[in-house]
Image (spheres, rainbow, N blue to C red):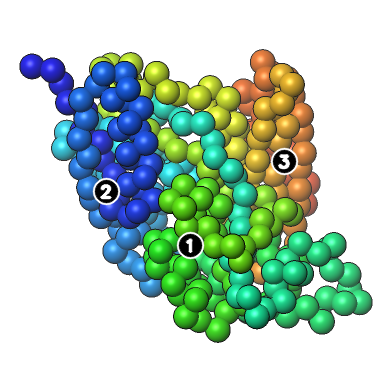
């Protein structure tokens, strides 16, 4: 009997889009598949800010458990939600080609935030004249926004993308920050949105990861057909940067690695959660020499003023 690959996924519209894309890729190679839908803790608790839930893998551990107990064969995740240390017995089998890594601001049409969000960095003389009210559940986005626009009120925003878009429409906020890839994949990006050109993304933002049980050669071989080596390398570098600094998903750490002309260009930063201080790093290496680029960049941060921010974030946690 031909083996069927059971694909574990969360139930949200975006998660289902990702899982169905993996399903399509497998079926083009002749594999039989079926989707297995599950709720994660992150889908159930829609009130507590992500950075206050106190656990890593809030969107992944339910699928991890199903994988290890042989209820599914592979699991599909937004890679930025996956802990930098995979659960014992689970291995990465593929990373799909990356979509856009950008963060976007969805703004109210009657607000000035859409016009000012990408202004030249505000100066001390005009900083107090810029006041916004926005929403995000991401400590990384919050920290970067407050570093640029400190006179901002920020509210927590949880739920799937459909729920969050509805809350923006119903609220008194000037706008809210989203990952562009999530909205674009399911054709929900509003016209009243703008890319935040200055905001660095979460490590692996825009990438999709597929994991399987260690030793499952059948699934590993099946998924290897659609693995994107450049995206996998860049995501590894970004996640190594995160892991070396703090290790968790809900941290004020941003990273972006891009392959161009045989080189990997890396930019990363860490920002105080209140936005008061930011430390950045930028390194370029040849692809053949870039395996440890994320660790090198993090050690550069820790050797300088970034160590103070890391220690404060750790103590606050």
SS under mark 2: helix
Q: Give the CA separation, mark 3 to mark 2.
A: 32 Å
Residue neighbourhood size for the residue with mark 3, other residues' Cα within 10 Å, grouped as few (<14), some (14–19), many (≥20): some
Rendered image quadrant of residue 124: bottom right
Residue at the image position 72 percent from the left and 76 percent from the top: 112
SS under mark 1: helix
Q: Nearer the viewer, residue 229 or 170?
A: 170
Report the residue marked by disc 1: 51
Report the residue marked by disc 3: 267
For marks 3 and 2 on the same chain, the one whose residue lies earlier in the sequence: 2
Residue neighbourhood size for the residue with mark 2, other residues' Cα within 10 Å, grouped as few (<14), some (14–19), many (≥20): some
Q: Nearer the viewer, residue 208 or 41?
A: 208
Res. 257 in view: yes
Residue 35 horizontal/vertical position (percent): 22, 39
Residue 98 horizontal/vertical position (percent): 54, 36
Residue neighbourhood size for the residue with mark 1, other residues' Cα within 10 Å, grouped as few (<14), some (14–19), many (≥20): some
Q: Give the CA separation, mark 2 to mark 1.
A: 18 Å
Residue at the image position 20 percent from the left and 35 percent from the top: 34
Residue at the image position 48 percent from the left and 62 percent from the top: 51
Q: Which mark is residue 62?
A: 2
For marks 2 and 1 on the same chain, the one whose residue lies earlier in the sequence: 1
Residue at the extreme left = 1
Q: Which mark is residue 256?
A: none
Res. 90 in view: no
For marks 1 and 3 on the same chain, the one whose residue lies earlier in the sequence: 1
Residue 175 horizontal/vertical position (percent): 59, 72
**Which dot, 1 or 3, sits closer to the camera?**
3
């Amino acid at each position: 009997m031909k083996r069927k690959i059971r694909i574990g996924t969360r139930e949200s519209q975006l998660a289902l889009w990702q899982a169905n894309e993996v399903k399509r890729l497998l079926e083009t190679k002749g594999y039989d598949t079926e989707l297995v839908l599950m709720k994660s803790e992150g889908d159930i608790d829609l009130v507590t800010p992500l950075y206050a839930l106190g656990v890593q893998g809030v969107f992944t551990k339910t699928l991890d458990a199903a994988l290890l107990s042989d209820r599914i064969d592979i699991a599909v995740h937004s890679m930025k939600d996956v802990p930098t240390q995979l659960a014992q017995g689970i291995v990465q089998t593929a990373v799909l080609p990356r979509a856009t890594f950008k963060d976007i601001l969805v703004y109210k049409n009657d607000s000035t935030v859409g016009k000012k969000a990408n202004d030249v960095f505000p100066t001390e003389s005009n900083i107090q004249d810029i006041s916004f009210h926005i929403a995000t559940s991401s400590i990384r986005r919050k920290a970067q926004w407050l570093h640029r626009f400190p006179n901002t009120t920020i509210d927590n925003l949880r739920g799937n993308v459909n729920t969050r878009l509805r809350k923006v429409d119903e609220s008194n906020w000037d706008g809210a920050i989203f990952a562009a890839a999530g909205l674009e994949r399911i054709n929900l990006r509003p016209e009243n949105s703008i890319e935040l050109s200055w905001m660095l993304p979460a490590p692996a933002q825009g990438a999709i990861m597929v994991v399987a049980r260690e030793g499952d050669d059948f699934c590993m071989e099946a998924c290897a057909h659609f693995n994107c080596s450049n995206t996998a390398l860049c995501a590894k570098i970004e996640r190594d940067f995160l892991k070396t600094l703090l290790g968790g998903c809900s941290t004020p750490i941003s990273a972006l690695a891009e392959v161009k002309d045989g080189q990997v260009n890396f930019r990363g930063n860490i920002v105080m959660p209140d936005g008061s201080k930011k430390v950045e790093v930028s390194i370029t290496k040849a692809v053949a020499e870039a395996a440890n680029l994320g660790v090198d960049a993090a050690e550069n941060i820790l050797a300088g003023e970034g160590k103070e921010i890391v220690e404060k974030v750790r103590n606050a946690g």
